[in-house]
Amino acid sequence: MKKTTAAITAVGGYVPDFVLSNKVLETMVDTNDEWITTRTGIKERRILKEENAGTSFMAIKAAEDLLHKRGIEASEIDFVLVATATPDLPVASTAAYVASEIGAVNAFAYDLQAACSSFLYGMSTAASYIESGRYKKVLVIGADKMSSIIDYTDRTTCIIFGDGAGAVLFEPNEEGLGLQDEYLRSDGIGRQFLKIDAGGSILPASEETVKNKQHYVYQDGKSVFKFAVSNMADVSALIMERNNLTKDDVQWLAPHQANKRIIDATANRMGVEADKVLINIDRYGNTTSATLPLLLYDFEKQLKKGDNIIFAAFGGGFTWGSIYLKWAYNS
Ligand code: UT7
């Protein structure tokens, strides 16, 4: 009997209108466009300015865009997964709210948090549900309002992150397209290098934690960079090797958009030419869980049925990994 695979059959996306450029950041902190561009590849990022709007605001827009493009009713969705590091509320599931708002009345929903690897891990979860035959339509949304956890007086982090959301639909495929292989890793040693200290169960919010700015992202950039460069390159090379893929067999590298230098190192290690590397970090910065689906959203028209795509991500935790997927449609 032929194995059922899990393929991406539609993509949606949303980024806020407000553009925060390097030039404007120069007026906010001690930085400059040249430093940001050469060290990260970022020129501008989007910031969600709507009042009382959280991550779900963008997730809903991305999901609605996807449903419209795919031409299906939300009631057909079986499961809604929201990959995010910035849920609307610390406890209530953002995914449950998103599912209800888009009208996915027959779905169950939950969030997945693995920092910048959330969407990558979410693809694995979605594919497993489809491959098992248990569900037919799984919506995975990667969404983050990073501006809600960034200190805009800290030049080491505020130049990096942005807000956005992207969504993909996974469905069964009988032609062998979709997710082919995955290699997912984690190492708790990483949490000292990239974290938010307060607001969790170790250090609940207090006047003191607010005063000490402990609710913002802290990153030891140099250390994270070192781990990210070697690990993202390693897993991408490994997944090519164990699937007998040469550089000519790979049509696209879809890497997490944290730093252009990390992306280049990964592509070099794989031997993949620059024109095969999907990049939008210059326009959005690091949108955490939204980087991978926003790449698919931006480059969807260039992706062809049967194309081999290698996804790679690295994030807080540490969490990282790589996924090999065959694209399933022409748009
Ligand atoms: O997505 C989740 C995973 N995250 C990542 O993968 C991020 C990994 N890390 C990075 O991308 C980079 O480490 C950063 C972009 C965060 C920083 O780049 P770097 O080349 O590692 O810079 P650095 O931290 O080593 O700092 C070099 C210098 C320092 O000055 P001194 O000590 O040499 O005088 C910093 O104080 O650059 C200074 N600096 C800045 N200068 C201008 C740090 N931030 C800025 C800034 N503008 N925004």
Image: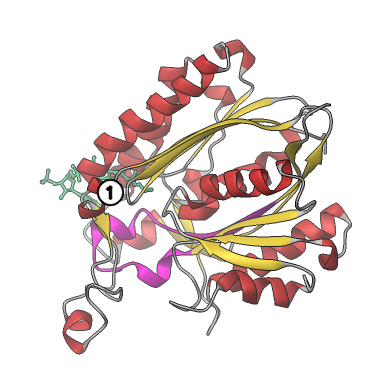
**Direction from residue 13 to residue 262 in the image, left or right:** left
Magenta region, residue range: 145-168
SS assignment at label 1 = helix
Q: Quick one: quadrant of the C terminus?
A: top right
Image quadrant assignment for residue 300: top right
Residue 151 located within the stretch drawn in magenta? yes
**Direction from residue 326 to residue 119 in the image, left or right:** left
Write the residue at 28% across / 65% down: 196
* Pointer 1 residue: 188
Amino acid on which disc 1 is placed = Gly
Above or below 60: residue 53: below
Write the residue at 45% across / 67% down: 86
Q: Which residue occupies the foreground of this view, 155 or 6?
A: 6
Q: Where is residue 59 drawn, in percent x and y?
A: 62, 65
Q: Where is residue 94 drawn, in percent x and y?
A: 56, 72
Q: For the residue carrying disc 1, how many other residues have a C-alpha within 10 Å: few (<14), some (14-19), or many (20+)?
A: few
